[in-house]
Structures are given as structure tokens and as C-alpha cells.
Image: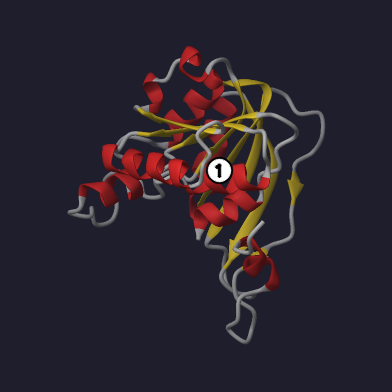
Amino acid sequence: MDPFILAAHIKPMGFEKIIDVGCGCGVIPLLLAAKYPGLRITGVEIQKELVRFAKKNVINNMLEKTIHIIHKNIKNIDVLDINGKADIIVSNPPYKKKGTGRLNPDSQKAIARHEIFLDIDLLLNCSNRLLKEQGRLYIILPAQRLSELMPTMEKYKFSLDLIRFVHIKKNEEAKLVILRAIKGNLCKPCTTAPPFYVYDFDNRFTKEYDSVFKPV
């Protein structure tokens, strides 16, 4: 659910350069490339098996000229690896702090869910280094982690531009939060978008959630 919701909130302008940090099997790059022809998208993934799946998905969708997958730890990515700084960085990072909760015995799932190789501090640090000035950073995280994200954004000179909470249903607490941040100073107040609901009161998908999965 998370990558589909996040991808639906990314609005590239023209032929922008995008980096997906922790791209997994390439869901977000594939969605963006299908919707916005002409983008240049780099997916960065540390897990070899997921890189293999991502590259296969790119080939199967004939998007080799649009999407490039790199097998590397994001902290080791240099600006030269991506042919210059990016306009947008997007990430659906691991949502559990290292040392909290049960660590999955499957190493692939453990790395995807726990901050073993990627945590909030590293994500913001690398985004600051790889983004152009006034570049945009899109993140989706558990809503309960918002309080720890805010000081880290300030530490790495990011200004919060948009925030939107994701609820399973109305009258239930938010499960996720979508953030758009700008590298550098922002000359306008942060926008708080209306809540995003997954289900209506009849336990059917809302029209907005359903639209996320409709073909382009």
C-alpha cells in the first residue's frame, strides 16, 4: 500500500531527475515512469535480490531508457553516480527503529522493515547531499514517527512543505504520514492536506484510494 500511496502524491514538473532511495523491486520508479514520460529515475537498493527483481521489472516494461537501478548503499552514492544532483528524492524507508519490535528472521524482510542500513538521519543526510537547492523530498512513514523526523529535517536544512495523514478509516487515528520537504528555506507556510482515507464506513475502498491503482 505505502509505495502506491506515496507515488500518487509525487508531481514531477517536466523532465526532472528523481532518485528512489531503497527502491525495492522498483514499484515507485515504474509507476512514475508510466505516468510521466521523459523522467530520469534512479533506483538505489542495497539488497542484491531486490535489485535483480527491479532490473527485470524495468526490462519487462521496456523502461531501460528511463529507469536506472543501482546496487549500492545510499551513503556511498556520489553525485557523479547519478550524473548530477536530483530534483526529487523519494523514499518509503524502513518503518521500525533498530532494536524495537521483533526482527524478522528473513534478512530481506528485516532490512526492509527495520533501520539496519537506512535510518531517518542517513536518509536526510544523503538527501541534503544529493538534492539540488530547493529540491523536493517525499517520504511516507508511520505517523507516530513524525516527532523524531522534524528535528532531523531541521538538522539537515529541510523545510516542511506539505503534510498529509493517512487513516485506515474516518474516526481512527492516523497510521501513516506523507511529507514533502524542500531543501533550503521555504517562503510559504506548510500545507496540511485533507486526510487520506483507505476505507469508507461500509468497508469499501474510498474513491481516492481506489484511483491509486487504476491504470494510467
Q: Looking at this view, is 34 or 139 the one in front? A: 34
Q: Is residue 142 visible?
A: no
Q: Is residue 151 visible?
A: yes
| Residue at left offset 34%, top offset 47% | 112
**Tag 1: Cα neighbours inside 10 Å, few (<14), some, or many (≥20)?**
many
Q: Amino acid at mark 1?
A: Ile
- Picture layout, residue 3 above or below residue 131: below
Residue 76 lies in quadrant: top left
| Residue at left offset 57%, top offset 38% | 150
Q: Residue furthest right?
A: 188
Q: Looking at this view, is 50 or 67 the one in front? A: 67
Q: How is this picture coloured?
A: secondary structure
Q: Residue furthest left?
A: 105
**Where's residue 64, x and y in %?**
50, 34
**Where's residue 42, x and y in %?**
50, 30
Q: Which residue is mark 1?
A: 139
**Where's residue 194, x and y in %?**
74, 60
**Where's residue 29, x and y in %?**
53, 42
Q: Residue furthest top?
A: 80
Q: Looking at this view, is 25 or 163 the one in front? A: 25
How many numbered circles are shown?
1
